[in-house]
């Protein structure tokens, strides 16, 4: 996966905030839905390859 940032991925800061929202038991359903959306757009940096990359 390329290291070029094309503006289509959530930042590390936003991903961290989204994670906190998802773990907050008092967070509203809409907030958790938005947080999930943010995390789905986050770049993976854990060494795991993206499934789309594997299909190529």
Image (cartoon, rainbow, N blue to C red):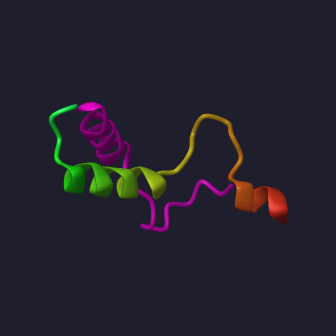
Name the residue at 47% across, 55% down.
40
Range of residues picked out in magenta: 1-24
Instruction: Determine which quarter of the picture holds residue 25.
Output: top left
Residue 34 coordinates in the image, percent (x, y): 29, 57
Residue 45 coordinates in the image, percent (x, y): 57, 40
Name the residue at 68% across, 40% down.
48
> Is residue 24 or residue 42 the one in the foreground?
24
Residue 12 coordinates in the image, percent (x, y): 38, 43
Image quadrant in which the C terminus is located: bottom right
> Is residue 26 or residue 47 the one in the foreground?
26
Instruction: Determine which quarter of the picture holds residue 55.
Output: bottom right
Image quadrant in which the N terminus is located: bottom right
Residue extending farthest to the right is 56
Instruction: Determine which quarter of the picture holds residue 51.
Output: bottom right
Q: In this view, does 38 lie above or below 22?
A: below
Name the residue at 81% across, 56% down.
54
The number of numbered discs placed on residues in the rendered structure image is: 0
Residue 19 among those drawn in magenta: yes
Residue 3 coordinates in the image, percent (x, y): 59, 54
> Is residue 49 or residue 31 the one in the foreground?
31
Does 24 sit left or right of 33 as displayed?
left
Does 7 sit left or right of 44 as displayed?
left
Residue 35 among those drawn in magenta: no
């Amino acid at each position: 996966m390329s290291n070029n940032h094309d503006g289509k991925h959530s930042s590390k800061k936003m991903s961290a905030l989204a994670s906190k929202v998802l773990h907050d038991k008092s967070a509203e359903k809409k907030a958790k839905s938005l947080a999930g959306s943010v995390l789905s757009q986050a770049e993976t940096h854990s060494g795991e390859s993206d499934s789309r990359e594997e299909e190529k």
